[in-house]
Image (tube, grey):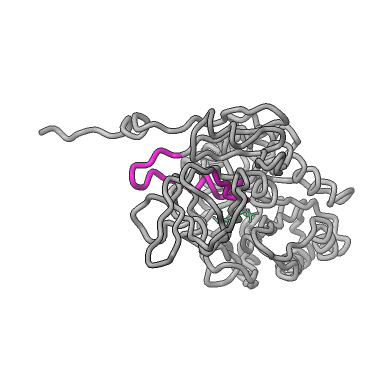
Amino acid sequence: MFEYRQGVLHAEAVSLEAIADAHGTPTYVYSRARIEERYRALHEAFGDTPHGIRYAVKANSNLAVLHVLGQLGSGFDIVSCGELERVIAAGGDSTKVVFSGVGKRDDELRLALTHDIECFNIESPAELDRLNAIAEELKTTARVALRVNPDVDPRTHPYISTGLRDNKFGIDVPTALSTYRRAAELPRVGIVGIGCHIGSQLTELAPFAEAIDALMRLVDQLTAEGITFEHVDVGGGLAIRYRDEKVPELNEYAEVIRRALDGRKLKVLLEPGRALVGEAGVLVTRVIYTKDNLGKHFVVVDAAMNDLLRPALYDAWHDVLPVRRRPGNAVSCDVVGPVCESADFLAKGRKLNVRAGDLIAIANAGAYGFGMSSNYNSRNRPAELMIDADECFEVRRRETLADQLALESLPPT
Ligand code: LLP
């Protein structure tokens, strides 16, 4: 979906050069076709195993992205009422929404109950009580699943590992057992499932299997006690290839999950974020200067850590692609932004042949790109565009300083 045509990088049929000229830089560019292709591939990988995709909104919460996925039949995994409001604004179906997160506030629980969401993924015994009380107030019933922390090592970056006992997420296995028993007694909650999410960017399948096995042991024990389950939510976490990682195929992933269910009649809910949108986006940026410090080459671009935080926060790798290939010798350089932090880099030690004014694309920036952006250094956040074949839609306009200042005021003198 991002390919060179006559030496110029295109998003579907649209030249990134033309995009930068028309919309400026830095700009996020998403390929609709790529999102659709990934959704369909995941859906097909599960075949006739009953399943539902609940896209993790946090990966990219632009309304257009949510709309495209909603149209394909996707539900959504949310972690705040802001995300729920976005799903609704994008025309999504709130009855296919699951609500995760360790710190759901009363107003958030209330809003989600009002919209009759599919399931609350409960992350503590205290949250269960709170939800039961609010459902009582509203004279309704909440569908719940406990998010279990199976204490499994996902073997990924420590900041995005969530299924270990040291992580704040979920409920440990013994507590889950007692909490399910208590939930079964509560008048305003109905148990519908069990779930987990053990981490993100998992390049191995064994941790998924291990986690589901732990969940299935709980299911068996509780079923024997008369507590029944309709679904197992296996979370998100499937990796994409940023560099040279060997990434599991969607079919292998589906097979591992099927095998772990071992014939149990449970619908599988999936909460993929990155696997659906990560490869569908690039960040287009323009070179402002090149410079050498004692022989070390820097390419200073107009995108920075406030636009794409992943390199600074996780030392993450994103490929750097010149939008127009230039003949001649490439040299090793660091691609850095204008922000006043040494952590403000987008890529280090890349072989590039670029000059001031050239455009480059930071690849695989569709997930956790714009969503983690900020106004640090009073920078306006980038525009977001969605490409559909030969058409380009501005799905979020570039921020202006007026947008930033609109929320602030001076104290009285
Ligand atoms: N479900 C839950 C409950 C989650 O917390 C997450 C991600 C997902 C699903 C989706 O995971 P995915 O399929 O995208 O791996 N900012 C980090 C990633 C943080 C992920 C947080 N939770 C990054 O840029 O790598």
Tell me residue 64's x, y (percent).
62, 32
- Extent of the magenta region: 359-381
250 left or right of 23 in image: right
Q: Is residue 309 highlighted in magenta?
A: no
Quadrant (top left/top right/bottom left/bottom right) for the N terminus: top right
Tell me residue 188's x, y (percent).
61, 45
Residue at 68% x, 37% y: name it: 95
180 left or right of 108 in image: right
Q: Residue 54 versus residue 321: which sits nearer the camera?
A: 321
Q: Quadrant of residue 122?
A: bottom right
Q: Residue furthest front?
A: 328
269 left or right of 397 in image: right
Q: Is residue 178 visible?
A: yes
Residue at 71% x, 57% y: name it: 234
Tell me residue 74's x, y (percent).
72, 39
Q: Residue furthest left?
A: 413
Q: Residue 102 versus residue 186: which sits nearer the camera?
A: 102
Q: Is residue 379 highlighted in magenta?
A: yes
Tell me residue 350's x, y (percent).
55, 61
Quadrant (top left/top right/bottom left/bottom right) for the C terminus: top left
Residue at 46% x, 45% y: name it: 356
Q: Quadrant of residue 171?
A: bottom right
367 left or right of 292 in image: right
Q: Is residue 78 visible?
A: no
* Total count of labels: 0
> Which quadrant contains ligand 1?
bottom right
Q: Residue 360 versus residue 138: which sits nearer the camera?
A: 360
Q: Residue 196 versus residue 116: which sits nearer the camera?
A: 196
Residue at 69% x, 43% y: name it: 2
